[in-house]
Image (cartoon, rainbow, N blue to C red):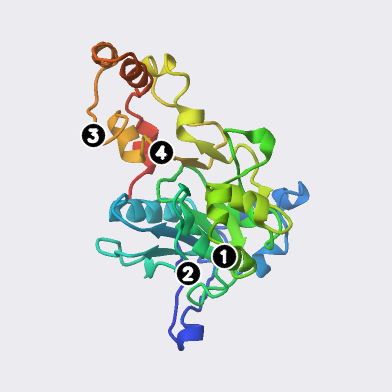
């Protein structure tokens, strides 16, 4: 795997990348596949030059919720599922334990206080900053609790490089809402998104979640990835709650990235538990344990919160 190299030439030119195909013969099948996608109208042939030959992937880690293992596993998954040169940038307030091949940057500043009553993950909106640590071009943002299960080259090739492309919100798909666990954007092209929040932080309360803000405030609107590419672990892999007792979660056919909003997280799916506070139980043992809870609400909650160990997550979620 070829990595992008960076060189320091001052603050404005700190990041400069060179990329090359390591062996033209080894990449013949990739080029053939790209030609097919271009003929099908699924890939813009101008993207390779307008996006640059180095794939830029961004993630954000703040606070204590995610340890360095999430960043290290993300790098490993990107490396195994990306052709050509790439660079993973982690914007974080704590870089300890993160592998040296990841370029760590400070957390981008929002420039305002998120008001009470806005529960979304608003720090992600700092990515719209006009100056994002000198980065230019197009970038793919990935939530740290994403699991990459197939090639992500398509996320860099699909659509127009000036588009903001996200997954489609799975809970209410008829609303055509953005789901920003996996989204691509042109760096610096939509700085008004952050500037408007800085002028009026109450927009956070109005929209509640940053995904609603992106859906309704982005000029020109968002575009969506093909429906099968990005999936939700609980919604698309686990199945209805009775089924979870009889089979492990399944990897959706044609999926490239599985996201893990809320619980369980990837380590929990591997261990076969709902969260790190719980232990793995065999199906019948968990069923009996759930029924032993003191209230009807607790019994119902724990009956639904069961999953068997997931071997395909263990296969993919590793450094």
SS at mark 2?
loop
Nearest to N terminus: mark 2 or mark 1: 2
Residue 3 percent across, percent down from the top left? 45, 67
Displayed quadrant of residue 173: top right
Q: Is residue 97 left or right of residue 85?
A: left
Circle 4 residues within 10 Å: few <14, some 14–19, many ≥20: few
Indicate which label's residue lies in the foreground, 3 or 1: 1
Indicate which label's residue lies in the foreground, 2 or 3: 2
Residue 72 percent across, percent down from the top left? 33, 55
Question: Mark number for residue 262?
Answer: 4
Nearest to N terminus: mark 3 or mark 4: 4
Nearest to N terminus: mark 2 or mark 3: 2
SS at mark 1?
helix
* Residue labelled with disc 1: 194
* Residue labelled with disc 3: 277
* Residue labelled with disc 2: 111
């Amino acid at each position: 795997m070829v990595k992008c190299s960076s060189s320091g030439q001052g603050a404005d030119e700190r990041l400069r990348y060179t990329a090359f195909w390591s062996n033209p013969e080894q990449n013949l099948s990739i080029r053939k596949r790209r030609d097919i996608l271009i003929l099908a109208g699924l890939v813009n042939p101008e993207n390779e030059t307008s996006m640059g030959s180095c794939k830029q992937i961004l993630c954000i880690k703040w606070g204590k919720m995610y340890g360095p293992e999430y960043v290290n596993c993300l790098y490993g998954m990107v490396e195994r599922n990306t052709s050509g040169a790439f660079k993973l940038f982690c914007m974080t307030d704590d870089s300890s334990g993160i592998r040296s091949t990841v370029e760590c940057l400070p957390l981008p500043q929002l420039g305002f206080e998120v008001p009470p009553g806005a529960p979304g993950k608003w720090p992600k909106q700092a990515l719209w900053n006009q100056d994002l640590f000198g980065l230019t071009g197009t970038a793919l943002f990935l939530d740290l609790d994403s699991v990459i299960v197939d090639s992500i080259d398509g996320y860099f090739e699909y659509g127009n490089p000036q588009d903001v492309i996200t997954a489609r919100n799975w809970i209410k798909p008829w609303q055509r809402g953005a789901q920003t666990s996996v989204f691509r954007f042109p760096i610096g092209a939509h700085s008004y998104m952050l500037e408007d929040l800085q002028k009026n932080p109450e927009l956070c309360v109005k929209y509640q979640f940053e995904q609603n803000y992106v859906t309704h405030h982005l000029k020109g609107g968002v575009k969506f990835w093909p429906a099968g590419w990005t999936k939700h672990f609980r919604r698309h892999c686990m199945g209805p709650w009775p089924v979870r007792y009889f089979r492990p979660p399944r990897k959706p056919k044609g999926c490239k990235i599985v996201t893990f909003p809320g619980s369980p997280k990837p380590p929990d799916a591997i261990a076969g538990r709902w969260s790190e506070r719980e232990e793995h139980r065999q199906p019948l043992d968990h069923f009996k344990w759930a029924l032993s809870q003191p209230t009807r609400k607790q019994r119902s909650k724990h009956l639904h919160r069961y999953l068997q160990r997931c071997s395909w997550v263990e296969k993919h979620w590793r450094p």
